[in-house]
Image (cartoon, helix red, strand yellow):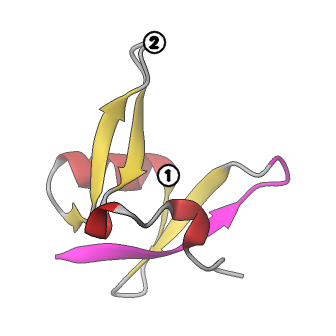
């Protein structure tokens, strides 16, 4: 199973894409879909309370996306 290893942010600081352990660069929406399908491990899909799904990094329980290195 792949894991998320790097992130890319837009000019507003929002995560827009990820790099996986196999080197693939995928959009946030693709990562969300693959996490729901069980293709990507170490993340969970959570509801933000307004019905919008979002990714949460759950690898080892104490690492956040903010701690991952940038793609570029």
Residue 38 picture quarter: bottom left
Q: Position of residue 26 (x, y in %)?
A: 47, 65
Q: Residue furthest top?
A: 50
Gap between marks 1 and 2, in whole Å? 18 Å
Q: Residue furthest bottom?
A: 22
Name the residue tied to disc 1: 28
Helix, strand or loop: magenta stretch: strand
Residue in the picture at 39% in, 15% down: 51
Category of crowding for the residue at label 1, using alpha-carbon neighbours closer than 10 angstroms: few (below 14), some (14–19), many (at least 20): some
Q: Position of residue 6 (x, y in %)?
A: 53, 76
Q: Position of residue 16 (x, y in %)?
A: 62, 54
Callout 1 secondary element:
helix
Q: Position of residue 23 (x, y in %)?
A: 42, 87
Which residue occupies the foreground of this view, 68 or 2?
68
Q: Is residue 21 left or right of residue 17?
A: left
Q: How many marks?
A: 2
Sequence-wise, the earlier of marks 1 and 2 is 1
Residue 71 picture quarter: bottom right
Callout 2 secondary element:
loop
Q: Is residue 61 left or right of residue 19?
A: left
Which residue occupies the foreground of this view, 67 or 72?
67
Name the residue tied to disc 2: 50
Q: Nearer the viewer, mark 1 or mark 2?
A: 2
Q: Which residues are magenta?
A: 1-12
What number is the disc on residue 16? none
Q: Please, is residue 14 above or below residue 40 in the view? A: above
Q: Please, is residue 72 above or below residue 43 in the view? A: below
Viewport quadrant of the N terminus:
bottom left
Q: Does the magenta-highlighted stretch encompass residue 48?
A: no
Residue in the picture at 40% in, 46% down: 55
């Amino acid at each position: 199973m792949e894991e998320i290893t790097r992130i890319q942010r837009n000019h507003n600081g929002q995560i827009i894409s990820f790099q996986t352990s196999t080197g693939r660069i995928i959009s946030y929406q693709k990562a969300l879909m693959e996490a729901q399908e069980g293709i990507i491990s170490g993340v969970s899909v959570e509801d933000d309370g307004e019905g919008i799904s979002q990714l949460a990094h759950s690898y080892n329980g104490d690492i956040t996306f903010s701690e991952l290195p940038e793609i570029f």
